[in-house]
Amino acid sequence: MRSERKLAIVILVIAVICGFNAASEAEPIRLKVSAKVDCVDVPVHTFIDLPASFANVPVEEIAVSLRQRSVGTAQVSGKLIPGQIVVGGNKKTQLWWIIPDVKANSVTMWTAALRRRQESEKETFSWRDTEGEYLDFLFDGRKVTRYMYALDRSTKQRVLETYKTFLHVFDAAGENLLTNGPDGLHPYMTDKVLYPHHRGIFIGWNRLEFGGKRYDFWHMGEQGRVQKHQKFLELTAGPVLARSNSLVHWNDKDGRTIIAEQRKTTVFHQSEPTVLLLEFLTELKAVNGDVFLDGDPEHAGFQYRPHDDVAKGGKDVKAVYLFHKDGIDAHKDKDLPWAAMSYGLNGKRYSVLYMDYPDNPKPVIYSAYRDYGRFGAFFKKKINDGDTLTLRYRIWISEGRMPERVKLANKYLEFVDGPKVEVEGR
């Protein structure tokens, strides 16, 4: 009996070792990348079929290394680039990586090798949840973003601080916030009135219509309306990207849900001077009747608000703006593809590029003129009962003076018409 048990253990060990080796020696995946525009540090992805030896391996345990190879050969060159396997909402497997540099109208060939991840491997995203308060995304232990999702009705002040969800951004050191929280003062009010509704990266409409009534999902406050975080639907982190997908209910004062939102934020690993490359994708579903998103450019849409010190500072820190061409009047001109803002904070200068995806509703009006830096795009749109409105944006933040217009334009083109990836032999 003992000999049979020993034999079974030996067979199990051999099977594990063989399985590990098989997974380590999987056939490399050959990829073709076609680019229309010049790109730098651009995220790319494609759907792949995992080799059979990895079929039962959790994606978190799969490490990917990519190298560029010469066209028409199997010869690889250049340094290894990390990749990341991600399972999408459609349960399909995606391969992601960051291409450091690619030229317009070019075709490059790549090889991806899969292996089991080692516990000692570093330089990767992770997440740290302070339950009921906020979720931090970190890269190699450094804070990158903080998703604020607390909802506390215990005091008037806590209601004011927690009535909506939003995203904070940290500086390159992961120490100081670049964005505003619920403690901002109105920059144009001499009596120092607290105006806490502009918070980091956020979304809302101040004249939302539902059931014959109008609701303010921008200021909210004591009105009892809240954006209530329900749960996380997805938390993904690796060497290329970090992603969270949260379910947020837009509720009236009686707790009835008007919009059920799935808010997906993806942060990509970037090199200096980039501080953040963020993709914001939200699905707004009307769950209890028709909803009409209405408001004005100052108090509706998807917005970015810098730290309150920008509002308190002088001319050396105030925000300045740049658009895709000269002569733009943001008060009048519509459907701008992007808007850029530069502001000073903590003795440094930061630039923010706000990109509006072409499939988002039109017409769009940008609020991009306040010298305290709150800016973003606004539109009006009806969502029929049971329907879902999908919105997609990208935010790029860099440290330093405002980049030249051509660089900003290329960043936008990376977003809307970036490199396409094909799996060879498929």
Image: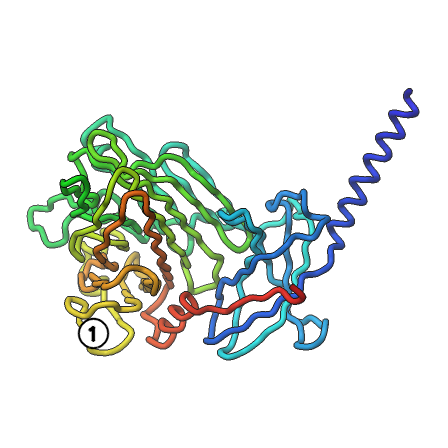
According to the picture, the residue beneath numbered tag 1 turns out to be 328
Residue ID at (77%, 50%): 22
Residue 352 seen in the figure: no
Instruction: For the C terminus, give its image quadrant.
Output: bottom right
Residue ID at (42%, 44%): 245
Dot 1 alpha-carbon crowd within 10 angstroms: few under 14, some 14 to 19, many 20 or more: few
Please identify the residue farthest to the top as the structure is shown.
Answer: 1
Instruction: For the N terminus, give its image quadrant.
Output: top right
The three-letter amino acid code for the residue at tag 1 is Ile
Q: Position of residue 187 (x, y in %)?
A: 14, 53
* Near-viewer residue (183 or 291): 291
* Near-viewer residue (79 or 204): 204
| 320 left or right, relative to 7 | left
Q: Position of residue 132 (x, y in %)?
A: 37, 32
* Near-viewer residue (365 or 383): 383
Q: Position of residue 210 (x, y in %)?
A: 19, 42
Q: Quadrant of residue 349?
A: bottom left
Please identify the residue farthest to the left as the structure is shown.
Answer: 191
Which structural element holds mark 1? Answer: loop
* Near-viewer residue (417 or 299): 417
Q: Quadrant of residue 273?
A: bottom left
Residue ID at (21%, 68%): 334
Query: Which color scheme did the rendering employ for the protein?
Result: rainbow
